Image (cartoon, helix red, strand yellow):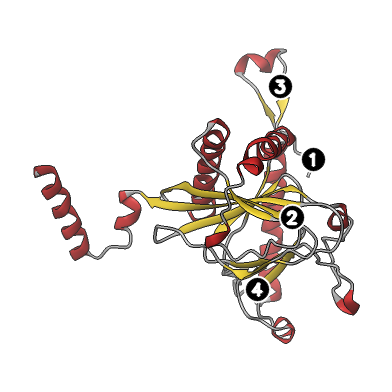
């Protein structure tokens, strides 16, 4: 389009330095392109206006954690978590058992490293709620553990529980073996016993078949290649599993669950008038007591 937009003050107009605003330039170009596209659609559809309404199934947030934080976490796990050897496996479904170092270990959040991590996770979880669902709520991590998987270990199909009506779950990959790193994460072909998704995390939010996709039904599963320093956050009801891998090295991750504490304003969105009256009365009674 050729239009350039600059930011600055009135003083900058007479010899000062104006900074080009490429974001606004792009936004203007996009608006013009959209207008042309709308005019084209009107012509092709005999003047009838057409709009698409995409219906989403869920949101998954990807967070890239700086290397220095990953290094600090791995050092803390090596020097404190593993030597403490506090197993967290009794309430988990993970089949971490094929190596003497296979384990699922408690990661306390009341020491210096844990409390710092909790602050970060609470903020990230709250950001997810507000960005993905416009939810006026705060996310609070209430448990955390580490997964130490070796050749043959796996985590079967499952979801996570929380203490509130809504909740979040997530994991952060800390170490990935070379036998997984070398796999193609973009277009894995699992035919012919290729092992193309060994060690991948499998996310499932429906039961569609391949035929369903041809019939324009949406994708309801995905294989995610683990990457060191990447965190995924999602609603706690999302089913997932971790497939076994076969090679040297440790596949290390951390898993978390967040409670979702809704604000009073958010809770009232889902209340009937009668429920709101009872809620307000309970508040008055509690103050009087």
State the separation of the CA atoms marked 3 and 1: 17 Å
User: Which of the marked residues, 2 or 3, is nearer the chain's N terminus?
Assistant: 3
User: Which of the marked residues, 3 or 1, is nearer the chain's N terminus?
Assistant: 1
- Mark 3 element type: loop
The answer to the question of whether label 3 and label 1 lie on touching residues, with beta carbons closer than 8 A, is no
Q: Position of residue 154 (x, y in %)?
A: 71, 65
Residue in the foreground of this view, choosing between 149 and 133: 149
State the separation of the CA atoms marked 1 and 4: 42 Å
User: Which of the marked residues, 2 or 1, is nearer the chain's N terminus?
Assistant: 1
Residue pictured at 68% horizontal, 74% vertical? 219
Quadrant occupied by the C terminus: top left
Q: Which image quadrant is residue 78 in?
A: top right
Residue located beneath label 3 in the image: 18
Residue located beneath label 2 in the image: 100
- Mark 2 element type: loop
Residue located beneath label 4 in the image: 220
Residue pictured at 17% horizontal, 49% vertical? 283
Q: Nearer the viewer, mark 1 or mark 4?
A: 4
- Mark 1 element type: loop
Q: Position of residue 230 (x, y in %)?
A: 70, 48
Residue 40's place in the image compared with 101, above or below, is below
Q: Position of residue 98 (x, y in %)?
A: 75, 62
Residue 217's place in the image compared with 127, above or below, is below
User: Which of the marked residues, 1 or 4, is nearer the chain's N terminus?
Assistant: 1
User: Which of the marked residues, 4 or 3, is nearer the chain's N terminus?
Assistant: 3
The answer to the question of whether label 2 and label 3 lie on touching residues, with beta carbons closer than 8 A, is no
Report the disc number at residue 55: none
State the separation of the CA atoms marked 2 and 3: 63 Å
Q: Which image quadrant is residue 22 in?
A: top right
Residue in the foreground of this view, choosing between 178 and 102: 102
């Amino acid at each position: 389009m050729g239009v350039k937009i600059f930011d600055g003050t009135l003083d900058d107009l007479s010899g000062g330095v104006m900074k080009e605003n490429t974001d606004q330039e792009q936004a203007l170009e996009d608006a013009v392109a959209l207008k042309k596209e709308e005019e084209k659609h009107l012509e092709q559809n005999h003047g009838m206006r057409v709009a698409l309404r995409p219906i989403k199934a869920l949101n998954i947030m990807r967070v890239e954690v700086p290397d220095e934080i990953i290094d600090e976490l791995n050092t803390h796990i090596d020097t404190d978590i593993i030597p403490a050897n506090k197993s967290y496996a009794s309430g988990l479904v993970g089949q971490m058992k094929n190596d003497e170092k296979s384990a699922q270990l408690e990661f306390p959040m009341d020491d210096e490293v844990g409390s710092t991590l909790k602050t970060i996770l609470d903020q990230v979880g709250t950001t997810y709620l507000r960005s993905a669902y416009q939810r006026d709520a705060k996310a609070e991590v209430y448990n955390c553990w580490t997964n130490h998987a070796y050749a043959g270990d796996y985590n079967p199909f499952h979801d996570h529980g929380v203490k509130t009506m809504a909740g979040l779950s997530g994991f952060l990959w800390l170490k990935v073996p070379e036998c997984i790193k070398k796999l193609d994460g973009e277009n894995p072909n699992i035919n012919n016993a290729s092992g193309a998704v060994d060690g991948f995390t499998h996310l499932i939010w429906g039961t569609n078949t391949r035929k369903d996709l041809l019939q324009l039904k949406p994708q309801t599963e995905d294989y995610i290649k683990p990457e060191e320093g990447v965190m995924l956050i999602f609603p706690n009801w999302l089913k997932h599993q971790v497939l076994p891998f076969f090679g040297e090295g440790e596949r290390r991750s951390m898993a978390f669950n967040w409670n979702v504490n809704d604000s009073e304003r958010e809770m009232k969105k889902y209340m009937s008038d009668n429920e709101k009256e009872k809620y307000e009365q309970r508040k008055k009674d509690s103050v009087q007591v």
